[in-house]
Amino acid sequence: MPHALLERPTEPARQRYREPHFRTVQNILRQAQLECDLLESGYEPYAGENVADSDVWADEESCFVPDISVAEALALGEKYGQNAIVCGSDDGVPELVWICGEATS
């Protein structure tokens, strides 16, 4: 079965709301809404954390969702403003899937 790691949305640097407090509050609220959506859909999200490898993005909460389809994970990612999701299968190899049709890096 497919699995997905859905990360809490971050505000892009060009976003007009640049105050760190606003981004933090928005991300906390969106993460809570995402987890509610997942639970209401019968999924069991497991808490995770994305640790950024550069200063461009902040570390952020995420959740691992076993047995969610890639299509449903993409729909949720789009609903919550994600650029991409990380998917995998039983072979354990992660794949970055862009929501906006961009190429993987």
Image (cartoon, grey):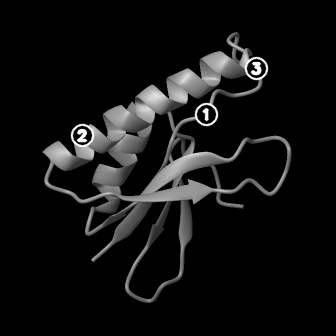
Question: Residue placed at 54% from the left, 36% from the top?
Answer: 9
In the rendered image, which residue does mark 1 sit on?
10
Question: In the rendered structure, which amino acid carries the disc numbered 1?
Answer: Thr
**Secondary structure of the residue carrying numbered label 3:** loop
In the rendered image, which residue does mark 3 sit on?
14
Q: Determine contact: label 3, label 2, CB under 8 Å.
A: no
Residue 1 left/right relative to 11: left
Seen from the viewer's position, the closer of residues 79 and 36 is 36
Cα–Cα span, label 1 and label 3: 11 Å
Residue 55 left/right relative to 67: right
Question: In the rendered structure, which amino acid carries the disc numbered 3?
Answer: Arg
Cα–Cα span, label 3 and label 2: 28 Å
Question: Residue placed at 39% from the left, 49% from the top?
Answer: 74
Of badges 1 and 3, nearer the viewer stands 1
Residue 42: which numbered mark, if any? none
**Secondary structure of the residue carrying numbered label 1:** loop
Whether 33 is drawn above or below 7: the answer is above
Question: Residue placed at 28% from the left, 51% from the top?
Answer: 72
Whether 97 is drawn above or below 14: the answer is below
Instruction: Pinpoint residue 35: horizontal percent, then vertical percent.
Output: 32, 43
Question: In the rendered structure, which amino acid carries the disc numbered 2?
Answer: Asp
Q: Residue furthest right?
A: 55
Residue 54 left/right relative to 24: right
Q: Of callouts 1 and 2, which one flags the residue occurring earlier in the amino acid sequence?
A: 1
The C terminus lies in quadrant: bottom right
Quarter-wise, where is residue 77 in the image? top left
Cα–Cα span, label 1 and label 2: 18 Å
Instruction: Pinpoint residue 78: horizontal percent, then vertical percent.
Output: 42, 37
Instruction: Pinpoint residue 85: horizontal percent, then vertical percent.
Output: 50, 54
Classed neighbour count for the residue bearing mark 2: other residues with Cα under 10 Å, few (<14), some (14–19), many (≥20): few
In the rendered image, which residue does mark 2 sit on?
37
